[in-house]
Amino acid sequence: MTDSAAPRFSVRLAATDDELRAAQRLRYDVFVEELGGGGPMVDHDARLERDRFDPFFDHLILTDHTSDRIVGVYRVMRADQARAAGQFYSEDEYDLTQLLGAGRQVLELGRSCLHRDYRGGMAMYHLWSGLAGYIRDHGIDVLFGVASFHGTDVEDLAEPLSLLHHRHLAPPDLRVRAQAGAFQRMDLIAEDQLDRRKAMVRVPSLIKAYLRLGGFVGEGAFVDHAFNTTDVCLILDTARMNDRQAMLYQGGAA
């Protein structure tokens, strides 16, 4: 029985094969079962969403101690880990030259998800707080990673993609660009013809959260047919965050 005075949630790095499999099982529930994604290494029999990059990432896991189960995950990759892997995961979709050539410490984020029963509450703030501690420990300056819209119908996503391009495009020193062979324009509707409120409703909650923290998007989207998503690259410069944004990121305010 859990001590009522003990914290309900904790965040730590997955340290065992069992913990990594639990994270991959949650990813399967969200990315494969809910969103229809796939991939060559997805194990449907064991219900594990995995890829070749998993051994090179650190995996942050959020545990609910009232049930002793993993209810949130985030995988993170530093530059030294990317060198061991041969590249960052995002480099299949985005040209990161502008970002990686700036001489700053970067961290790639990916596969962020929560169990459906924990969305809309404080669980994400606990996960962010754990991530903030990781960032402090490793002296990270800039966070980046792909985030997804469900589906691959770009025409249907024209309004939110155009809003991101017109209102939240990264400054030149952070502006990564979708790879030339798969570049999908995001400025599909002129800014003066956008219903910004309607468009923002279509933006996924994770992307909205990073925009509230002062995040930006790269130039161009990537349509990922295998994963049934349309991806944008999010970039967050910790030096550009104001005090309120930093507090939100670290889980200090709702």
Image (spheres, helix red, strand yellow):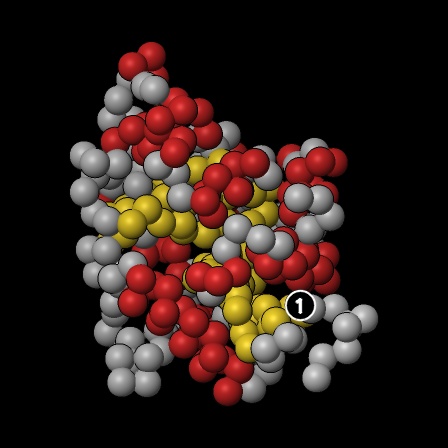
User: Which image quarter is the N terminus in?
Assistant: bottom right
Q: Position of residue 93 (x, y in %)?
A: 32, 52
Q: Is residue 47 above or below residue 60?
A: below
Asked if residue 18 lies left or right of residue 40, the reply is right
Q: Position of residue 104 (x, y in %)?
A: 61, 48
Q: Which one is in front, 112 or 122?
A: 122
Task: Name which residue type carries label 1.
Answer: Phe
x 53%, y 66%: residue: 72
x 44%, y 61%: residue: 116
- Mark 1, Cα crowd under 10 Å, few <14 / some 14-19 / many 20+, is some
Q: Is residue 186 above or below residue 17?
A: above
Q: Residue furthest top?
A: 192
Q: Residue furthest right?
A: 5
Q: Is residue 174 above or below residue 79?
A: above
Q: Which one is in front, 195 or 189?
A: 195
Q: Which one is in front, 68 or 76?
A: 68
Asked if residue 192 lies left or right of residue 113, the reply is left
x 53%, y 51%: residue: 120
User: Which image quarter is the C terminus in?
Assistant: top right
| One can see residue 33 in this view | yes
> SS of the residue at dot 1?
strand
**What is the count of numbered marks?**
1
x 46%, y 30%: residue: 168
**Can you identify the residue that label 1 sits on?**
9
| One can see residue 135 in this view | no
Q: Position of residue 121 (x, y in %)?
A: 58, 53
Asked if residue 186 lies left or right of residue 86, the reply is left
